[in-house]
């Protein structure tokens, strides 16, 4: 019995998707992140604080100002710059994750449209969460949840959700499964599931460094390289309920008799 191709990843498309992703990360590093790369060193902190105090010494009046307050203001400016660097890195991570997510969904939609033109299935793909998409791929023989890159992409997803929504549902999962992205700068430690002496860290403790970005990027490249060249149908296919429901809606729409005038 002839088997039909359900999903196909051509090599030109694969390489194009990888190339676009790598270009995004390289340009973000060169044009945005490089300027923040050395801020975390003690030497940089001292240099920036001393530079600010020197540039603003004309404002200091011993008769009215406390030298400690003046120094504290310089430190506050330095920490604001650190926060700007973190926010910039989080924006870059958000961009690379959402672009990967959209490209993956678009590939699925394009491949489905080769078999049938279905608005119901198309909408279902765009509405499905990441777990449901993984469930769909597993049902056709590609279980990418079992691959090493999966947890890194999953962590990236949670980081982006916390960055966007703050203390929403994702913060609890991030704390439990990937606590290294939540950092208490004052304690200089990360939260673990066994910690009983710290209040739960929240979205304000979300910290991303250049190594995290590279790990997220490498995982996305690994994902695209792992997409099978061709995924065929077979008699044992059992798609998830959400996909089957959308397909049944499409079938019922096609079976409706045309209205008579």
Image: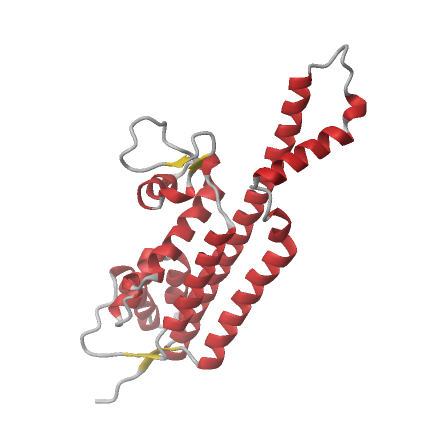
Instruction: Establish if 218 lies above or below 225.
Output: above
Q: Could you tell me which residue is drawn at 30 percent across and 64 percent down?
A: 147
Indicate the position of residue 186 as horizontal and vertical percent values: 47, 29
Q: How is the image coloured?
A: secondary structure
| 57 lies left or right of 94 | right
Indicate the position of residue 53 as horizontal and vertical percent values: 72, 28
Indicate the position of residue 22 as horizontal and vertical percent values: 53, 66
Question: Which of the 4 image quarters holds residue 81?
Answer: top right
Residue nearest the observer in this picture, 163 or 6: 163
Q: Could you tell me which residue is drawn at 63 percent across and 23 percent down?
A: 72
Instruction: Establish if 196 lies above or below 233.
Output: above
Residue nearest the observer in this picture, 145 or 127: 145
Most extreme residue toward the left is 236
Q: How many marks?
A: 0
Question: Which of the 4 image quarters holds residue 71?
Answer: top right
Most extreme residue toward the front is 43
Most extreme residue toward the right is 58
Is residue 129 visible in the rendered structure shown here? no
Instruction: Establish if 212 lies above or below 221.
Output: above
Residue nearest the observer in this picture, 224 or 251: 224
Residue nearest the observer in this picture, 198 or 228: 198
Indicate the position of residue 175 as horizontal and vertical percent values: 35, 40
Q: Could you tell me which residue is drawn at 43 percent across and 81 percent down?
A: 10
Q: Could you tell me which residue is drawn at 37 percent across and 54 percent down?
A: 154
On the rendered image, what quadrant is the C terminus found in? bottom left
């Amino acid at each position: 019995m002839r088997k039909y191709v359900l999903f196909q990843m051509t090599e030109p498309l694969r390489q194009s998707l990888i190339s676009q992703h790598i270009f995004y990360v390289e340009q973000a590093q060169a044009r945005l992140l490089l300027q923040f790369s050395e801020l975390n060193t003690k030497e940089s902190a001292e240099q920036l604080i001393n530079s600010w105090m020197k540039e603003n010494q004309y404002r200091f009046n011993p008769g009215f100002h406390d030298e400690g307050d003046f120094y504290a203001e310089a430190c506050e400016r330095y920490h604001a710059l650190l926060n700007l660097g973190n926010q910039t890195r989080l924006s870059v991570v958000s961009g690379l994750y959402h672009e990967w997510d959209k490209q993956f969904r678009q590939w699925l939609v394009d491949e489905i449209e080769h078999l049938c033109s279905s608005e119901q299935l198309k909408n279902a793909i765009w509405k499905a969460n990441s777990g449901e998409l993984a469930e769909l791929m597993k049902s056709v023989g590609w279980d990418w949840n079992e691959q090493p890159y999966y947890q890194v992409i999953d962590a990236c997803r949670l980081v982006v959700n916390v960055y966007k929504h703050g203390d929403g549902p994702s913060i609890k999962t991030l704390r439990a499964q990937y606590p290294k992205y939540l950092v208490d700068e004052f304690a200089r430690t990360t939260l673990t599931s066994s910690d009983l002496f710290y209040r739960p860290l929240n979205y304000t403790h979300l910290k991303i460094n250049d190594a995290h970005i590279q790990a997220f990027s490498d995982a996305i490249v690994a994902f695209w390289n792992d997409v099978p060249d061709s995924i065929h149908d077979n008699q044992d296919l059992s798609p998830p309920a959400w996909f089957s429901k959308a397909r049944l809606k499409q079938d019922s729409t096609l079976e409706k008799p045309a209205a008579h005038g």
